[in-house]
Amino acid sequence: MADTSKTTLIMKRSFNVPVEKVFEAWTNSELMKKWFFTMEHTNKVTKNDPRVGGSWEVVDHREGKDYRAIGEYIEMESPHKIVFTFQMPQFSDLHDILTVELNSAEDGTEMTFTQEITVIHEEDWTAEDIEKAHEDWKRETEQGWHYMFLGLKQLLETGKIEYPNF
């Protein structure tokens, strides 16, 4: 097995809807297929069993390829906290841990999203190489979530997502 290390990405977002609606978007298959690692028109599969020990799966079809993401729920405190694994088995047998914390705010919900990212090391990496990889993986991961969270915000606040033209 390859050497690995961990780095942590933390993102905060605000939504002008109650906590319960944000929680539902993370746990309801019909809502997940619109924004969570997929878009409604590219989604092939969305399965979800949102309970401790339950699993989830999303298959997105892009550019002629299927991208499968899977995970298992570790902790579930409706409607304030979800902790689960995130894995893309076609790329690695390793998984990350995602934590979604939802708190009521004056005008809706404050979400704190944390991802414990597993970084795979290449042979003979130095401490500097690992540090650079941590920053690169965090930046690339944050970019992906940024776009997903934009879609989530639109979905929650307007009822639909305005996808870019593809």
Image (cartoon, grey):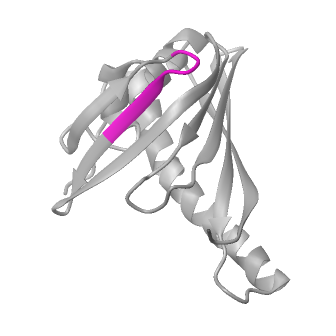
Q: Tell me if residue 32 comes above or below residue 44 in the rendering.
A: above
Residue nearer the viewer, 12 or 44: 44
Image quadrant for the C terminus? bottom left
Outermost right residue: 127
Q: How many marks?
A: 0
Q: Going by the image, does 1 lie left or right of 106?
A: left
Q: Residue at 37%, 35% (x, y): give it.
A: 57
Q: For residue 80, which quarter of the picture?
A: top right
* 53 in the magenta segment: yes
Using the image, determine if residue 93 lies above or below residue 121.
above
Q: Residue at x 55, y 64 (%)?
A: 140
Question: Residue at the bottom extreme?
Answer: 124
Q: How far across and how far down the image is residue 122, in percent?
A: 64, 82
> Looking at the image, which is closer to me, 126 or 79?
126
In the rendering, at what x and y percent does residue 36 appear? 41, 37
**Residue 1 is one of the magenta-drawn residues:** no
In the rendered image, is residue 159 in sight?
Answer: no
Residue 43, quarter of the rendered image: top left
Q: Which residues are magenta?
A: 51-58
Of 165 and 126, the residue lying toward us: 126
Q: Is residue 64 visible?
A: yes
Residue 111 is situated, as x and y percent measured from the top left of the image, at 66, 29
Q: Pick whichever, 36 or 50, lies toward us.
A: 50
Please identify the quadrant where the N terminus is shown: bottom right
The residue shown at (59%, 18%) is 52
Q: Position of residue 25 (x, y in %)?
A: 45, 22
